[in-house]
Image: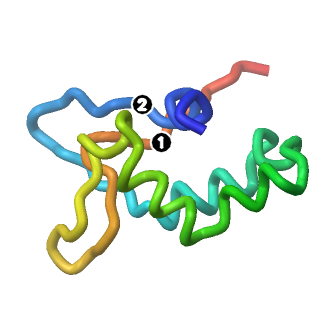
Amino acid sequence: MVSWFQFEYKQNKSSEEISYLPISQIYNDFKNSDTYFHLNKSEKDKYTKVKFFEFIKTNIFFKKYYVERYSQQRYLIKGWCKTDYNFDL
């Protein structure tokens, strides 16, 4: 899951603008990914929405970026943004 996240998202190192990603958006992206699709049923059971949120809150990689509340939003990852893929076909 962490490797999928690091592939799909990049750390925003710009000091001018700090980005906040809702964990629900990350969860939806993960559920729609090939990584999730190729998991077996027992592995998919580990990534229900509740368990996914708990994983983000407690994982050693994610917990330093986890924010409970910012402005009027809740459950966020701070300082990361979606990777833009610009493939020239």
Q: Residue at x 71, y 19 (%)?
A: 88
Classify residue 53 as left or right of residue 62: right
Marks 2/1 in contact by CB < 8 Å: the verdict is: yes
- Percent of width and height locating residue 62: 37, 42
Residue 61 in which image quadrant:
top left
**Element type where label 2 sits in the image:** strand
Q: In which quarter of the image is the N terminus?
A: top right
Q: Quadrant of the C terminus?
A: top right
Q: Residue at x 28, y 52 (%)?
A: 66
**From what the image shows, is residue 35 above or below residue 32?**
above
Q: Which residue is drawn at 75% across and 47% down?
A: 33
Residue 71 in which image quadrant:
bottom left
Between residue 74 and residue 20, name the one nearer to us: 74
**From what the image shows, is residue 22 above or below residue 39?**
below
Q: Residue 10, labelled with which disc?
A: 2
Q: Which residue is drawn at 50% across and 67% down?
A: 24
Q: Residue 24, labelled with which disc?
A: none
Which residue is farthest top? 88
Between residue 54 and residue 84, name the one nearer to us: 54
Between residue 9 and residue 54, name the one nearer to us: 54
Between residue 84 and residue 64, name the one nearer to us: 64
**Element type where label 1 sits in the image:** strand
- Judging from the image, the colouring scheme is rainbow
The residue beneath circle 1 is 82
- Percent of width and height locating residue 39: 84, 44
- Percent of width and height locating residue 31: 71, 57
Q: Sequence-wise, which precedes: disc 2 or disc 1?
A: 2
